[in-house]
Image (cartoon, rainbow, N blue to C red):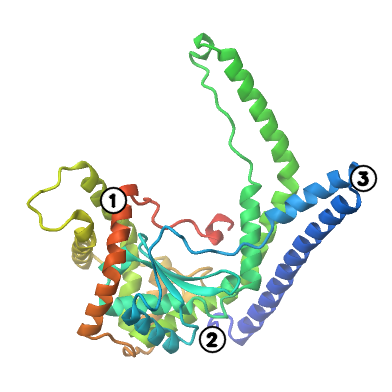
């Protein structure tokens, strides 16, 4: 693990103390959830002959259900590949996982996002790689290895936010805080409303809805504030360890795919929104514009090729643009609250460069493309049917609760 250059050896000690405190807070959250559930059930069961005890136990059970541990599941609507379905792809993933030093993935799901991430699911915490088809189509072979290595290294035990104990507490608190957020208010337009039919009933319904909303907001204010405050506390306590784990993941991916490939992949992250917007435009165009009947391929079969050509043009225009002015990217990466892509690029450029330890030859790339093609077409067909969200990068927990 890299040492914090800003704080020196003392920074490691403070990060260790903060991590221990995060485990203590997460343990308190799990104990509180179990205590609420047990107390509520006992009040309901043992005081079933009374009225007061079940009424006291029911809110405790509901609160325990709100804070229950949440296990992630595989999306049944996404194409899922297992080892028997894509042996060449899993051979590459196993090589990358062994080079990074993490557990090998069990499944792969293809998505329409321009990103790649590894997540755990189920009680056995099996690992699944969520691979975005736009990212795979627009990246070079070396960049693909860099992105896959970075995604796998992100589940290193040093990243306590992604761990089973602290991560589950953080997800439970986040989901509970989101559920207890105050809902919106019913708004009735004033202009012309008095002349509408049943206007008085509509306005009376809106008044009652807002009254119930205010009552619910006041009732949930204290537990909601406690959940939100605990989420922020956990994010603050896990911040140093998570930042150090992110930098260590950059180094691990550089050793696996070469430093140049990691830098190129980081630079291409600025094109993610443009890639998703172009994918959305092409999907809308395929649904609304009359298709050329002379074309030999269907739109879903050439969607990702068109996205790749558009991205190549964006890279050419970016290469001819003037360099960015000095700014926040000049701050040392280890000193930033959360390092940006520019700071990570600068940090990698200033370290000894690593050659590529994992490469894929031409026949290997051909086999992997053949294995991914049916699933990629299925994702393209789904994109053309449902579209893609223009919010290409959903707000993380850290951004929503900072």
Q: Residue at x 60, y 74 (%)?
A: 160
Callout 1: SS: helix
Calculate the distance from the C-alpha at mark 2 to the C-alpha at mark 3. 59 Å
N-terminal of the two: label 2 or label 1?
2
N-terminal of the two: label 1 or label 3?
3
Q: Give the number of callouts.
A: 3
Q: Residue at x 30, y 76 (%)?
A: 143
N-terminal of the two: label 2 or label 3?
2
Q: Which residue is mark 1?
A: 384
Q: Residue at x 65, y 29 (%)?
A: 210
Label 3 environment density (alpha carbons within 10 Å; few <14, some 14–19, many ≥20)? few
Q: Which residue is mark 3?
A: 49
Image marks 1 and 3: residues in contact by CB distance under 8 Å: no
Instruction: Name the residue at the left extreme.
Output: 294
Calculate the distance from the C-alpha at mark 1 to the C-alpha at mark 3. 58 Å
Label 1 environment density (alpha carbons within 10 Å; few <14, some 14–19, many ≥20)? many
Q: Nearer the viewer, mark 1 or mark 3?
A: 3
Q: Which residue is mark 2?
A: 1
Q: Is residue 130 left or right of residue 398?
A: left
Q: x, y percentage for residue 149?
A: 40, 80
């Amino acid at each position: 693990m890299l040492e914090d250059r800003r704080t020196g050896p003392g920074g490691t000690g403070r990060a260790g103390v903060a991590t221990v405190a995060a485990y203590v807070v997460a343990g308190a959250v799990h104990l509180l959830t179990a205590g609420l559930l047990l107390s509520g059930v006992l009040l309901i069961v043992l005081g079933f002959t009374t009225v007061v005890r079940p009424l006291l136990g029911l809110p405790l059970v509901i609160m325990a259900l709100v804070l229950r541990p949440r296990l992630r599941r595989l999306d049944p609507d996404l194409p899922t590949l297992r080892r028997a379905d894509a042996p060449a792809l899993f051979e590459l993933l196993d090589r990358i996982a062994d080079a990074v030093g993490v557990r090998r993935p069990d499944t792969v799901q293809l998505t329409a996002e321009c990103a790649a991430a590894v997540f755990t699911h189920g009680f056995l915490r099996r690992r699944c790689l969520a691979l975005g088809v736009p990212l795979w189509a627009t990246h070079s072979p070396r960049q693909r290895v860099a992105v896959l290595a970075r995604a796998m290294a992100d589940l290193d035990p040093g990243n306590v936010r992604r761990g089973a104990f602290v991560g589950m507490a953080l997800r439970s608190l986040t989901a509970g805080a989101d559920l207890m957020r105050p809902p919106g208010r019913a708004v009735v337009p004033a202009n012309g409303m008095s002349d509408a039919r049943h206007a008085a009933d509509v306005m009376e319904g809106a008044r009652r809805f807002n009254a119930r909303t205010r009552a619910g907001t006041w009732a949930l204010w204290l537990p909601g504030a406690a959940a939100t405050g605990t989420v922020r506390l956990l994010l603050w306590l896990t911040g140093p360890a998570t930042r150090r784990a992110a930098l260590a993941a950059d180094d691990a991916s550089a050793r696996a795919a070469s430093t140049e490939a990691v830098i190129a992949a980081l630079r291409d992250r600025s094109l993610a929104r443009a890639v998703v917007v172009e994918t959305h435009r092409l999907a809308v165009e395929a649904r609304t514009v009359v298709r050329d009947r002379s074309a030999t391929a269907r739109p879903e079969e050439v969607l990702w090729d068109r996205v790749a050509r558009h991205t190549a043009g964006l890279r050419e225009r970016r290469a001819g643009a003037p360099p960015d002015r000095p700014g926040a990217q000049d701050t040392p990466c280890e000193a930033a609250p959360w390092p940006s892509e520019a700071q990570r690029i600068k940090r990698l450029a200033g370290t000894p460069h690593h050659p590529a330890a994992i490469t894929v030859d031409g026949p290997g790339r051909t086999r992997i493309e053949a294995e991914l093609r049916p699933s990629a077409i299925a994702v393209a067909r789904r994109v053309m049917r449902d579209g893609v969200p223009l919010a290409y990068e959903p707000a993380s927990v850290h951004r929503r609760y900072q």
